[in-house]
Amino acid sequence: MTFIEAFSILVAVVGPPKILLPFLVDTEGADARRRWQVALTSTALAIATGLFVIVAGRLLVAVFHISSGALMLASGVILFVHALDLVLGRNHSEDNRELATAYYANPVAVAYLFLMADASDIKYTFVLAGGFLAVIALDLAAIAVLGILLRWVRTTYVWVLVRILGVLLAALGVDLIINGLTELKVL
């Protein structure tokens, strides 16, 4: 796998379109300082989580005897439930705690990192880690731009966008569930 291939796949699963929505939901009403605190803490946690999965992912999957179909099925269920919360306007965090899982290490991203990780090839591990770090840097830049845009966009428009993107995330969750079931030969 080349750097461009790793970067392209990771942009699709952990790029700005995937992280901006949950970030916006969790930091609604927060001032700029608090948003940056959440962004930087989440970024640090995501880097640690992502690099751990890249280095140890295949070993963990092998030790626990987890198939790629089971990873996709579990990711789809978790993503679908999260998407329902977005569409229905349910927010479970009362104090806007920053969690990397809500942004960068979402279930789909973690599943893909587990599936893409191959610790037996050091070059491949560095390529995947480099692609992951580049996407995280892109995400942090997108958060900075979001902060600027929030000064001019009304909250009502943002919530309409949250609902629309929540429906799309729910569809992605259903797609992952179907793919997981197909790979497990249930469908």
Image: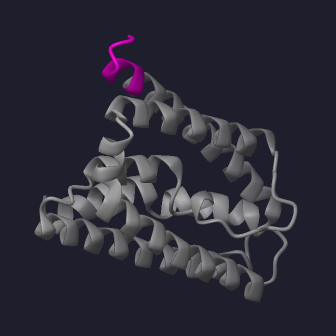
Residue 102: image location, x then y, percent? 62, 58
Q: Which residues are magenta?
A: 180-187
Residue furthest top as drawn: 187
Classify residue 72 as left or right of residue 126. right
Q: Position of residue 93 (x, y in %)?
A: 81, 58
In the picture, residue 100 is in which quadrant? bottom right
Q: Quadrant of the N terminus?
A: bottom left
Q: Is residue 30 magenta?
A: no
* Residue pictured at 81% horizontal, 51% vertical: 91
| Rendered location of residue 157, percent (x, y) | 75, 57
Where residue 47 sits: x, y (%)?
Answer: 45, 74
Residue sitting at x 20%, y 72%:
126
Identify whether 180 is placed above or below 186.
Answer: below
What is the quadrant of residue 41 in the picture? bottom right
Which residue is drawn at the image coordinates 46% and 30% (left, top)? Answer: 73
Give the residue furthest to the bottom: 33
Q: Is residue 99 above or below residue 78?
A: below
